[in-house]
């Protein structure tokens, strides 16, 4: 009887460890989205509540199955997996705090070898410090003193493309540019939107700053009466395919 109950418990804990691994995969997906998308939280309180509930449930499940291999593995994966979230979404505490709290809890609560946890914890801490320093230097080096302001934006009649008219104030009397992006590659959810990065195309730059007139004829974009973009042009140039993506961490 006791043996049967013990077998039942071990399989229950193994099942719980699988759920914990799914939560870890969830964190990895969010990290991926933070790298390749701009995260726009549309409902901050509800989004925080959503992540908090999921993190509490996942944390409880993983504490229950803390001796299982998958739970130990999850505890080791979550820390480095959260690095892109912390760096690229710094300031979005409604997203960072619930995920980070769960990761820290499971890392220390799992039944992994204490020596291993101390070693990996030290390595992870160094990785975070060095990555934060490198990111700060990288962004500071690329930062431009020019001031940019979006003065107009809109979408094509079909909704497939969006544009922005940006005025830039710099030491050379400034400029006005028109930027085009795909409008169908974003990931939109009830509480958060992931706006794709790296596909924007600067169609034209006019110096000094000037007013421009934007007109759509179907999905062809005209600037001051002159055609500057057609869908066929983007298709031939593979503008919005994966291989043309630029890695934009700004």
Image (cartoon, helix red, strand yellow):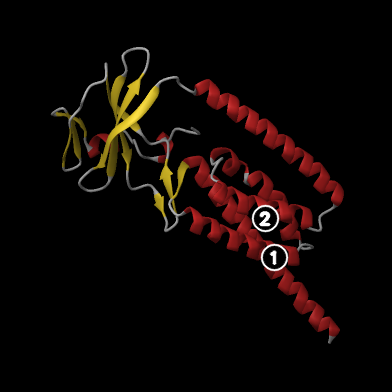
With 14 as the anchor, is 137 left or right in this view? left
C-alpha gap between disc 2 and disc 1? 9 Å
The answer to whether 196 is drawn above or below residue 14 in the figure is above
- Residue 79 % position (x, y): 68, 47
Task: Give me the residue at 50% from left, 46% from top.
Answer: 33
Rendered image: mark on residue 73:
none
The answer to whether 14 is drawn above or below residue 214 in the figure is below
With 103 as the anchor, is 140 left or right in this view? left
For this orientation, the residue located farthest to the front is 45
Q: Secondary structure at mark 2?
A: helix
Task: Give me the residue at 59% from left, 59% from top.
Answer: 52
Q: Which residue is mark 1?
A: 60
The answer to whether 84 is drawn above or below residue 30 in the figure is above
For this orientation, the residue located farthest to the bottom is 1
Q: Toward which corner of the image does residue 237 lie, by quadrant? A: top left
With 189 as the anchor, is 76 left or right in this view? right
Q: Nearer the viewer, residue 225 or 191?
A: 191
Q: Is residue 65 visible?
A: no
- Residue 27 % position (x, y): 59, 52
Q: How many other residues sit within 10 Å of disc 1, few (<14), some (14-19) or many (≥20)?
A: some
Task: Give me the residue at 32% from left, 42% from top.
Answer: 182
Q: Which residue is mark 2?
A: 102
Q: Number of labelled discs?
A: 2
Q: Nearer the viewer, residue 173 or 181?
A: 173
- Residue 23 % position (x, y): 61, 59
Q: Is residue 55 visible?
A: yes
- Residue 77 % position (x, y): 68, 49
For this orientation, the residue located farthest to the top is 172
Task: Give me the residue at 77% from left, 73% from top.
Answer: 10
Q: Earlier in the sequence, mark 2 or mark 1?
A: 1
Q: Secondary structure at mark 1?
A: helix
With 220 as the anchor, is 239 left or right in this view? right
């Amino acid at each position: 009887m006791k043996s049967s109950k013990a077998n039942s418990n071990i399989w229950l804990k193994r099942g719980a460890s699988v759920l914990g691994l799914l939560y870890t995969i969830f964190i990895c997906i969010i990290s991926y989205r933070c790298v390749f998308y701009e995260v726009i939280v549309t409902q901050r309180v509800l989004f925080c509540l959503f992540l908090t509930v999921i993190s509490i449930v996942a944390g409880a499940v993983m504490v229950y199955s803390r001796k299982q291999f998958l739970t130990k593995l999850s505890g080791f994966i979550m820390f480095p997996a959260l690095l892109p979230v912390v760096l690229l979404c710094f300031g979005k505490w409604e997203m960072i705090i619930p995920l980070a709290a769960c990761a820290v809890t499971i890392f220390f609560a799992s039944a992994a070898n204490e020596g291993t946890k101390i070693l990996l914890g030290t390595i992870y801490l160094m990785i975070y410090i060095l990555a934060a320093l490198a990111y700060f230097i990288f962004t500071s080096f690329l930062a431009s003193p020019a001031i940019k302001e979006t003065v107009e934006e809109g979408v094509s009649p079909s909704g497939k493309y969006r544009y922005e008219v940006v005025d830039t104030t710099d030491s050379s009397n400034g400029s006005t540019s028109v930027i085009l992006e795909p409008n169908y590659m974003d990931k939109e959810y009830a509480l958060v939107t992931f706006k794709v990065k790296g596909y924007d195309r600067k169609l034209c730059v006019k110096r000094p700053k000037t007013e421009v007139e934007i007109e759509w004829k179907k999905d062809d974009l005209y600037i001051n009466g002159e055609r500057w973009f057609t869908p066929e042009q983007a298709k031939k140039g593979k503008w919005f395919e994966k291989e043309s993506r630029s890695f934009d961490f700004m």
